[in-house]
Each structure stands twice: as structure tokens, then as C-alpha cells.
Amino acid sequence: MEELKNISEEQLLKELERRKNKPKPKKKAEFSKKIFFGISIGMVTLILFTMFMVYKTQNLNPLSYILTGAFGAFTTAIGFYYHKARKENEIKISRGVNLDNDYIDMM
């Protein structure tokens, strides 16, 4: 900011506008989110495939075997993701990072 003290107001406005319009780096998705979305997409694909095969074969046995195992894995992934998110939020709250005043009032 020292270099901005000795310039004119017009130059200062141009410099501030340039800095404001500077592209911000994209945030990479967290690994846990990638796992969660991957399992979610896999679940939807598995459900659709199972529904198609049950329709084609008129056999309901795959529902009792394949889908129960898949839902077990999906439930584990959801539990892991929410537990991790809760712990991260507890750390952020304890540090006071990016908290809204409304949220602080609720505590």
C-alpha cells in the first residue's frame, strides 16, 4: 500500500478497479466432497440399473441384496461427511472465522 500514497486520485481509482476485477483463484473441492459426490452418483446409477434389470427380468431378488449393501455404503459416506463437516465448523467457530452476527446471537 506504500506505493499507492504518491499517485493521483484518478490513478488510484484505476488501480483499485484493476485489483477489484482481478480474477480470483478457484477453490478446489475438498476430498471428502469428491468422495461424497462419487458415491452419490454411483448410488443413483446403481438404483437406475437395478430398476431396469428388475423390469427386464421380473425378479425382485436384486433389491434385497444389491441395494441394501449399496445403501449401507452410502449411509457410511453420509455419516463420515457430516461428522467431518461438524468438526471443521467447530474449529472455525472456536477461532471466530467468518461468523455472521446473527449466528453469534443464536449461540
Image: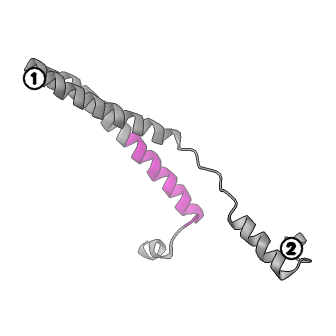
Cα separation between marks 1 and 2: 73 Å
Q: Which residues are magenta?
A: 79-98
Residue at image location 23% in from the left, 31% down from the top: 47
What amino acid type should be assigned to the residue bearing mark 2?
Answer: Leu
Q: Which residue is mark 1?
A: 60
Which of the 4 image quarters holds residue 66?
Answer: top left
At a point 42% along the width and 46% down the height, the residue shown is 83
Residue located beneath label 2 in the image:
4
Quarter of the figure that contains the C terminus? bottom left
In magenta segment, residue 52: no
Counting from the top left corner in percent of width and height, residue 9 is at 83, 82
Amino acid tagged 1: Leu
- Find residue 35 and name its label: none
The residue depicted at 19 percent of the width and 22 percent of the height is: 65
Mark 1 surroundings within 10 Å by alpha-carbon count, few (fewer than 14), some (14 through 19), many (20 or more):
few
Q: Position of residue 40 (x, y in %)?
A: 35, 37
Along the viewing direction, whichever of 78 and 39 lies nearer the viewer: 39
Q: Does residue 59 appear in the picture of this structure?
A: yes
Choose top left, top right, bottom left or bottom right for residue 92. Answer: bottom right
* Direction left: furthest residue: 58
Above or below — where is 70 with respect to 99?
above
